[in-house]
Image (cartoon, rainbow, N blue to C red):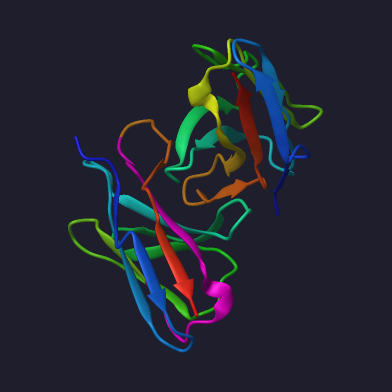
Amino acid sequence: AQTVTQSQPEMSVQEAETVTLSCTYDTSESDYYLFWYKQPPSRQMILVIRQEAYKQQNATENRFSVNFQKAAKSFSLKISDSQLGDAAMYFCAYRSYFFGNEKLTFGTGTRLTIIP
Amino acid sequence: DAGVTQSPTHLIKTRGQQVTLRCSPKSGHDTVSWYQQALGQGPQFIFQYYEEEERQRGNFPDRFSGHQFPNYSSELNVNALLLGDSALYLCASRSTSGFTYEQYFGPGTRLTVT
């Protein structure tokens, strides 16, 4: 079974600064997907960024980028130029590559606070 | 384009009762998954429905059951409610057509069992 670990329950960053959220995972599969989801107080889980394990290039979406280290089973999220609207719970999630095995396995989350 | 919708928003039930939660997937989506998110935790996978059948199930007891209708909407039923069933229940949908695998989440139903 796959597991996802987020070792930082809470993080804070000054507005406009950069912050990195950590995530490690354990799997015996060679192909899979990794995601970062954001959950603001409104509760709606919003996809921030995704990474396919077979791609060596790290994914980037505007101010959000990942550092994917497959051998180390590490998948960190970097948020640049932090904005007040980035304040939320951030969850790292794993999904198997195989059709029919689509459950998302989530970590316990990191609460990100933005300091004005 | 409406996203994933869930009803009701909040629900309060008593131990031993039964509850039904509803989900309408995003337009064009045919697969629905349900997750339980306890306070302060990450979501836990309950099950997934595709073509009106349960395709995959997480580690949840048989008290948790579901259904998918021909229009792809879905229901989650929980029987004999326990205090520990209090949680946010999230529905997620995705489309199996095309090469896409992202799941889109609804706003959730907050269930409180007293």
- Residue drawn where x is 41% and y is 79% of the image: B13
* Image position of B59 (left or right of B33): right
- Residue drawn where x is 68% and y is 21% of the image: A13
Residue A23 in which image quadrant: top right
Could you tell me residue B26's position as x and y percent? 26, 43
Span highlighted in magenta in the image:
B77-97
- Residue drawn where x is 49% and y is 38% of the image: A40
Could you tell me residue B44's position as x and y percent? 57, 57
Could you tell me residue B99's position as x and y percent? 38, 30
Could you tell me residue B24's position as x and y percent? 25, 54
Query: Is residue B83 rendered magenta in the image?
Result: yes
Q: Is residue A21 in view from this perspective?
A: yes
* Image position of B21 (left or right of A115): left
- Residue drawn where x is 47% and y is 71% of the image: B112
Pick whichever, A69 or A45, lies toward us.
A45
In the picture as drawn, the residue positioned furthest to the right comes out as A72
